[in-house]
Amino acid sequence: MAARRSRRNGRFTKSSSRRRRKPKTNLTNIAISAAVANGVTQGLFNTNLVEFMTGRVNGVYKPGGDGSSVITLPELLGAGPGGIGGNFAGTAGRYDNLSNSLMSNFKTNFFPMAVAVIGIPIAAKVATKVLRKPVLTPANKLIKMTGLDVKL
């Protein structure tokens, strides 16, 4: 380390180099993101996040064959009888194509989706501030002792 001159007294001092640590994975932010994503998929696709990703609605894998407003990722990718070019969700009328299905789901589920997108981050921020000293700080110290690269 090179010595440098202090501006106040003209003496040389050692400058210490700053150490940069890899940022820890924040489990609270991951949980908030998952909850908001679940709220959006519930609002637009009328199913939860896991069912949307896997295509298994109520334990059954029938993309496009359920004949309802439930939309899954395999349906969007063209799996099932409807596919991208055919009738969407296996019916005609209100859910005959993707835009009509999304609009119908959006109108039906607007309020719960808005609460999820706006309310969950606000509630998490308030809870984090309230629980910081009594719960989160001791928990983070315990996690640090285990050597995991995460925090709450």
Image: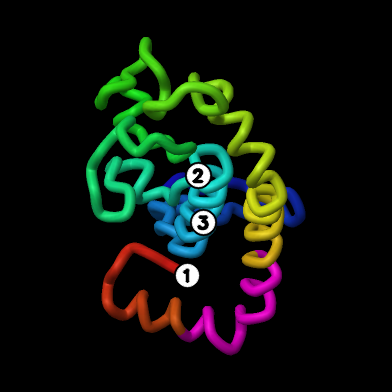
In the rendered structure, which segment of residues is drawn in magenta?
125-138
Give SS at disc 3.
helix
Q: Distance between the residues labelled 2 and 3?
A: 15 Å
Q: Can residue 99 be seen in this view?
A: yes
Near-viewer residue (5 or 145): 145
Q: What element carries label 1?
A: loop
Identity, as a three-letter code, of the amino acid under mark 2: Asn
Instruction: Give how far apart the Cα atoms at labels 1 and 3 are.
Output: 16 Å
Mark 1 or 3, closer to the camera: 3
Percent coordinates x, y for residue 21 in the rendering: 40, 54
User: Is residue 116 shown left or right of residue 96?
Assistant: right
Using the image, tell me which numbered label, if any, was put on residue 152. Answer: 1
Q: Which amino acid does label 1 sit on?
A: Leu
Q: Residue visible at 50% across and 64% down?
A: 28
Q: Distance between the residues labelled 1 and 2?
A: 30 Å
Residue located beneath label 2 in the image: 46
**Between disc 2 and disc 3, whose residue precedes?**
3
The residue identified by callout 3 is 35
Between 24 and 122, the one lying in front of the other is 122
Tell me the crowding category of disc 1: few under 14, some 14 to 19, or many 20 or more residues within 10 angstroms, Cα based: some
74 in relation to 98, above or below: below
Nearest-to-viewer mark from 1 and 2: 2
Q: Does the magenta stretch include residue 60?
A: no
